[in-house]
Amino acid sequence: MLDISNLTKTYSGNPRPSVDNLSLSVREGEIYGFIGPNGAGKSTTIKCMTGIVGFESGSVTVCGADLKSDPLAAKRQIGYVSDDHMLYEGLTGREFVNFVCDVFDVPEALRRERLEKYLELFSLGDAIGKQIKTYSHGMKQKLNIIGALIHEPKVWILDEPMTGLDPKSSFHLKKLMREHADKGNCVFFSSHVLDVVEKVCDRVGIIDGGRLLADCTMAQLRTTGLDESLEELFLKLTDDSEHVLKEDVTEEESAE
């Protein structure tokens, strides 16, 4: 449902790619965990795959639609929770949700039904008629999540979605992720909370220095015979990656 092939993104002024020839696929019915240290390239990868920033080479395909050649078709299949609250704070919560529903052509009856469900799940009913600028950090995160889910897209892309959520809301979001994948859709889930990733994800990708270091199912991880947790594997791979990247830099400096 989501296919990234040889994706490379380099920012001006930085000779090393932020995302370096990265390829991965997320299948129907999967929750895919995407993890890495700060500055590893996670958010840049997500901004490329949602069309927020361009990339110089590679491709992103969403439900068969190529992001570069048919961006509208690709983006209509995506629900995106950013890590920085992309909201119009002068609107009320209800106005914002209705705006999203208008963009994605959600029928009036369906939007009311879905909104009531999400308002109850995330305990936001008392605030939905108030301006977003009056919301707390956690309330903004909840509205951000509702805006990404309200049109029920095939592909949910969630970048640190549980930051600021209370335990009850986090529980409901994890349950929604599983239900969404079990309906034949997929979830791409980036998080620093490795315990949550290990519990809810079917497959995990580990990125560091813009490179994909590992891509395996949780079942494969548990049957390696190494008795490693995801946290242990993550620390081992990223430590090794840091050593390799330092060697690369040294070789480049020597060449100069």
Image (cartoon, grey):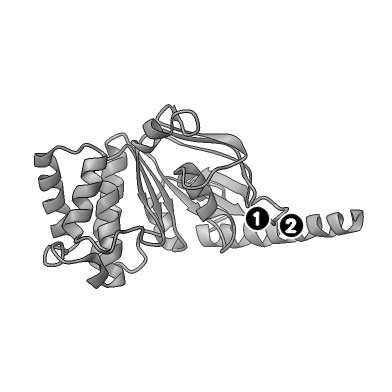
The span from disc 1 to disc 2 (Cα, nearest Å) is 7 Å
Taking the spot 23% from the left edge, 54% from the top edge, the residue there is 96
131 in relation to 233, above or below: below
Image x and y of residue 169, in percent: 24, 63
Which residue does the numbered mark 2 point to in the structure image? 245
Taking the spot 67% from the left edge, 62% from the top edge, the residue there is 239
Image x and y of residue 132, in percent: 24, 65
Q: Outermost residue toward the front?
A: 90
Crowding around mark 2 (Cα neighbors within 10 Å: few <14, some 14 to 19, many 20+) is few
Which numbered circle lies on residue 49? none
111 in relation to 62, above or below: below
Answer left or right for 96 relative to 79: left
- Helix, strand or loop status at disc 2: helix
Name the residue type under label 1. Answer: Gly
Taking the spot 11% from the left edge, 53% from the top edge, the residue there is 116
**Front residue of this view, candidates 18 and 250:** 18
> In the rendered image, is residue 150 in sight?
no
Task: Count numbered badges in the picture.
Answer: 2
**Residue 174 figure quarter:** bottom left
**Front residue of this view, candidates 213 and 86:** 86
Which residue does the numbered mark 1 point to in the structure image? 209
Tell me the quadrant of the picture where the C terminus can be found: bottom right
**Front residue of this view, candidates 183 and 246:** 246
Crowding around mark 1 (Cα neighbors within 10 Å: few <14, some 14 to 19, many 20+) is many
The answer to whether mark 1 and mark 2 are in CB contact below 8 A is yes
Name the residue type under label 2. Answer: Leu
90 in relation to 198, above or below: below
Tell me the quadrant of the picture where the N terminus can be found: top left
Answer left or right for 243 relative to 196: right
